[in-house]
Amino acid sequence: MGLNVIMMGPPGAGKGTQAGRFARERGLLKISTGDILREAIKEKNPTALAAQAQMDRGGLVDDAMIIAIVAERLGRPDARPGFVLDGFPRTVAQARALDELMARTANSPLIVIDVAVPEQELVRRLGSRRICRGCGANADGVAATSCGCGGELIQRTDDDQSVVRERLKIYQTSTKPVLEYYRERPTFRVVNGAQPPERVAHELDTMIDDAASAMSGERAR
Ligand code: AP5
């Protein structure tokens, strides 16, 4: 049975950092809707380019478009051993669509992790984040002006202070209700994301393993 994890949390909580590490360490597929959209914009995909204005303003992209992207990705063979979702679902409509998809594929239950971080810290992190224009990697704490791959370090358009404020607002109105949608499930967990990344990683791994073994105990009964 696959390990299917959703990494939830506000912008800057560390979803991408932890999802990437966890997926790498466990050999799972990581699906980041933000990365997929940014990559498609770079490749000048017309649908993604149409969504770019919305992203640059800090708003959400159309549910139908995002659901189609995730459904297509989850249908590929490399998603069968399990996956980590980063940045999806972000609305209750997306969460419902994911449940329908999971029911059709008879997959393992979803393990939902909420990475909780106070707003002040989120604003600080996003204000200082730099990413590589070439490979898209985060490059915090790097004093150099270029990434290891040779790419230039830039600020993400949506990390501009006013856009960050809008993203946090949208998170409260559209994405927080998704936490309520999942909260009563036995596989819902909250991790304190305002700790050093290694500490968050340790707690998160323990929570996921605990939720997975609770699930398999439930199945055995
Ligand atoms: P997306 O790319 O998903 O952005 P986001 O959710 O706003 O998340 P971020 O990437 O900003 O933060 P994160 O939580 O992943 O943190 P990270 O690990 O990078 O989405 C962008 C846009 O695409 C959306 O606004 C929307 O328009 C559109 N979109 C995407 N998905 C969509 C969907 N499903 N529906 C509709 N629209 C969608 O870390 C942040 C920084 O903090 C980094 O610099 C990192 O190094 C640092 N950091 C991480 N952990 C720690 C720690 N423990 N301590 C200190 N610093 C840390």
Image (tube, helix red, strand yellow):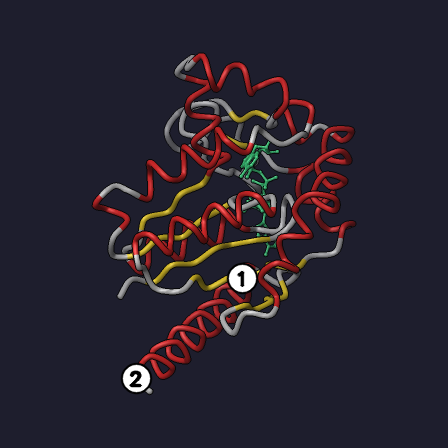
Q: For the point 49% across and 73% down, which residue is it?
A: 207
> Which label lies toward us, 2 or 1?
2
Q: Secondary structure at mark 2?
A: helix
The quarter of the rendering in which ligand 1 is drawn is top right
Image quadrant where one finds the N terminus: bottom left
Question: Residue beneath label 2, please?
Answer: 220
Mark 2 or 1, nearer chain start: 1
Q: Residues within 10 Å of mark 2 (few under 14, many from 20)?
A: few
Q: Position of residue 19 (x, y in %)?
A: 45, 52
Question: Residue beneath label 1, please?
Answer: 113
Q: Amino acid at mark 1?
A: Ile
Q: Position of residue 139 (x, y in %)?
A: 52, 38
Quarter location, residue 161: top right
In-front residue for pair 110/167: 110
Q: Position of residue 111 (x, y in %)?
A: 46, 64
Q: Amino acid at mark 2?
A: Ala
